[in-house]
Image: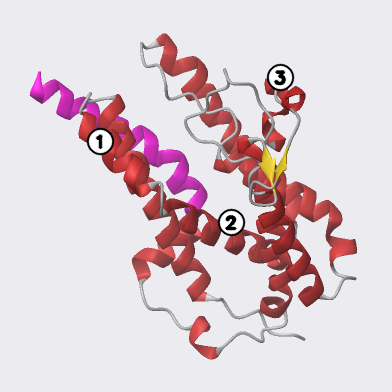
Amino acid sequence: MKSERKRIYLLDELRGFAILCMIVHHTFLDVGDVLGLPWGYKVFDALCTVQPVFWAIFIVISGICSRLSRNTVKRGFIVLCGGLIISLVTAVIMPLMGFYGAEIYFGILHCLGSCMIITGLLMPLIEKIDYRVGAVISLALFFFTNGINNHTMLFGLINLPESWYQYDFLAPIGLYSDSFKSADYFSLIPWFFMFLFGAFLGKVAKDEKLPKFMYKQRSKLLCFVGRNSLWVYLLHQPAIYAVMLVIAFIIA
């Protein structure tokens, strides 16, 4: 019988590192929102220049893991439900408590869950495509569509019709009106293509052909965070808010 697949610890560590970077980024936004300190917004805006790198790492690794999962669709529904819980808390419960501006309608968990479901359904087709060809096409589509949130494509060379940006129900795919606001927002376009890029690369991981150093553990903390990324992400915001509220009470 085939032995159990070796765990790729580097993926856990990179995912853990990426999500910790996201949490640090969000913390500075909370410094501005909850404590009312302007420097929190300044640090948050400054980190926005590098944060997409960590988003990409997290999403690519999630795509790789979708190729290793026994049931990607089921995992996708679980993650999507996590995103819906966040929407319920931030868009319904928190406003009732007097906290506004933190509403999340289609954040990272909504996007990842949807990507997992779509990729899981397409997996029979994905497995028939040469992973190198699929990876190149996926990455090309990501860069081609990357400006969709700014009404452009192909690095700003193609302007999209303003009529496409009139309805917020299209926000999950990247089209939304000027009035749409989401404190955490990841549209399926272009990020699904980055996820798909990871799914194609996952063929190498599934065949256990990665370099040997990727199977060695270096940080237990990062591995723990990476393996429990869903729970860490779900719980980090309430924990940060609680800390901020205590600080605000002390300052007051």
x then y, percent, for residue 47: 35, 48
Q: Earlier in the sequence, mark 2 or mark 1?
A: 1
From the image, tell me which residue sits under label 1.
Answer: 40
For the N terminus, which image quadrant?
bottom right
Distance Cα–Cα, label 3 vs label 2: 28 Å
From the image, tell me which residue sits under label 2.
Answer: 59
Q: Is residue 230 magenta?
A: yes
Relative to the observer, which residue lies in front, 214 or 59?
Answer: 59
Q: Quadrant of residue 220?
A: bottom left
Report crowding for label 2: few under 14, some 14 to 19, many 20 or more residues within 10 A (C-alpha).
many
Query: In the image, which is nearer the foreground, mark 1 or mark 3?
Result: 3
x then y, percent, for residue 2: 74, 85
Q: Residue 64, relative to residue 73: is it above or below?
A: below
Q: Quadrant of residue 71?
A: bottom right
What residue lies at 43% left-to-right and 48% top-to-bottom?
232
Residue at the far front in the pictured view: 157
Look at the image and give the residue range highlighted in magenta.
228-252
